[in-house]
Image: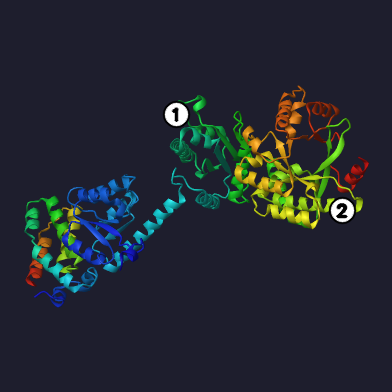
Amino acid sequence: MLTLETLKEYGADVNTGLSRCANNEALYLRLVRIAAMDLSTDALGKALREGDFKTAFEVAHKLKGGLSNLALTPVAEPIGKLTDLLRAQTPVDYSELYARISEQAKALTALL
Amino acid sequence: MSEQKTFRISEEKRRILLVEDDFINQQMLLESLGGVYDVVMTETGEDALEIIRNQHETLSMVLLDLNLPGIQGTEVLSRIKGNPVYAHLPVIVMTSDSEAEVECLTLGAIDFIPKPYPASKVILARILRTVELSEDRETLRLTERDQLTGLYNKDFFYRYASQLDLYHKDTPTDAIVLDINHFHTINDRYGKAKGNEILKLIAEQALAFVSKNGGMVCRCEADTFMFYCPHFTDYKRLLDCMSVSLDDRESGDSRIRLRMGVYAEADRTIDIEQRFDRAKMAADTVRGNLTNPIGFFDDSMRDAENRAEQLIDDFPAAIREKQFRVYFQPKFNVTKDVPFLCSAEALIRWNHPELGMISPGLFIPLFEKNGLIQALDRYVWSETAAQIRKWKDRLHVSVPVSVNVSRVDLDVPELTGHLKSIMESNQLDMEDIMLEITESAYTDKQDQIVATVKELRKMGFRIEMDDFGTGYSSLSMLLSMPIDALKLDIQFIRHAFKENKDTRLLEIMFLLAKSFQVPTIAEGVETEEQFRVLKSMGCDVIQGYYFSKPLPPEEFEKFFTKH
């Protein structure tokens, strides 16, 4: 069950996320639920595997927006890092970063 | 709350356009802003521009995400700022890319909100401040500008010019005033729309001139423009730049005629307003001068201005200490073979403790301009009445004396009461004092003036129309005017007896007066020849140095006991 406590245990910066929702707990939890349900990393993984970094950047950037604002740090932080690397077109191996993202995404979805 | 109570701009919920395609971000911002603002939301740049196009008048602000599907936020921003109709709309951009912040501020964004967002209350406070500032800026924009031309208005122009002085203490500056000659005739002949078009055209040229050469410009009255510029010398170039045509022709009669007053390298120790007063004074020196339409403020004008200031300052003491003296210039009836003294005109002299005797030509026009003439006239009336009383008591004789009534006196409702009380307190008969009213006084508020003069006549005063021939009275008006004598303007006499003697105009004036059966008075008569010619033409009364200069009371007393 998704609650402020389970989110805190997950590692989310709940207070910051709440402050962005005018401290409306119900809204915050509703938005986290929506974000978690929509959180599919498949498209990101496919683009990275195929070396389509443009699409990978767009997908990552899109994911990052909502997750960061909700302060879902464990998943938002690696996605932010990946976005910055892709924006700078840094030639690195993204697989480890992607694996972290997938793992944290699953952990978040498991809270639902 | 009732409709009446909420019908206040301060109560109105401001509308914000939120351009954001991410659902979570949308919901967060709606939660933050929805209670305070009316939020219009869209997800694409195209839709945003459409909404702005249709609703910009009711939008207070745009909150713009940079990363949008379709056209990007930066493009939306530059299109908003590139359109003069809604460029004033404040835009706050939202971005996680710190590099983009500078670009957006350069493009015209008023502020940015970073992503991830700060707390709701921070966003709200920033938006509140932005809306307030932008409304203040808009109010300022509307109040500091002349609505017709978009130039500064006079008050803000003076304020900004003073600020420029603070930043450029050592830069020599010019105060320049530009007037359109007879602008009202343009409005009368071509209509107000054409007049406005001309003003806008001049404003455009003026703005182009200061943009290129530095300085600032404003429109301060209907047809007056003021420039405050770093000192330059080619003023004709400025005048040429401003010289616009009534139509497309580039030259000839259709060009608007301008006059310009320049106070070059203006004295920075005096008020900015005073500097422009001086430029205006310089412009007035070339009024009607078509060959030389640029006047310069110089030392002689400064001296005249200082003297004028001193005379105004010294006026109350002069009245109090009776520095003003009433002189009497005899008037002779010349209708018989031997001229005889029939009356006198009271004329003012100022014996100033520092400056000595001051010519009335110096202070009367000045006091006419600032209204002090009213107090001076009253002083003359009282002194004259008191003097007549003294003569009556001591010598048991008196001569009727005419006193001047200025235009401004006629506007005061207490005029008749005041004159009546002077007559009564000195126990004078109505024929002891005559009133001289200048012809030009009749041209403005004609009905009211004629009614006042009629009332004065009804009280028993005799009225002389002074300076006749300068006020452009129509002949029909002359018929209805309540007057007892016409006093020809001194210029007619001077002109008629100049080198090429030409008395035709004088003759016509006498014929005119005769046909109206009104006696005539000629003033400024100095020579035997003038006297003879005027007498032969049928002039009734003559005043001037030929008979006597204006005399102080004690000498006039001797004069009239002799005659």
* Residue linked to disc 2: B390
Crowd class of label 2 (few under 14; some 14 to 19; many from 20; radius 10 Å):
some
Q: Quadrant of residue B17?
A: bottom left
Check the image and name the residue furthest to the top: B500
Quarter containing the C terminus of chain B: top right
Q: Secondary structure at mark 1?
A: loop
Q: Secondary structure at mark 2?
A: helix
Is residue B314 at least partly visible in the picture? no
| Amino acid type indicated by mark 1 | Asp
Residue B377 position in % (x across, y down) = 73, 50
Residue A11 numbered tag: none
Check the image and name the residue furthest to the bottom: A5
Relative vertical location of residue B530 with respect to residue B551 in this rendering, above or below: above
In the visual, does B516 lie left or right of B74? right
Residue B225 position in % (x across, y down) = 52, 41
Residue B196 position in % (x across, y down) = 45, 39
The residues bearing labels 1 and 2 have C-alpha atoms spaced at a distance of 68 Å
* Residue linked to disc 1: B247
For the image shown, how many numbered marks are present on the structure?
A: 2
**Residue displayed at 55% across by 35% down:** B182
Quarter containing the N terminus of chain B: bottom left
Is residue B553 at least partly visible in the picture? yes
Q: Nearer the viewer, residue B77 or B312?
A: B312
Q: Quadrant of residue B316?
A: bottom right
| Amino acid type indicated by mark 2 | Lys
In the visual, does B91 lie left or right of B420? left
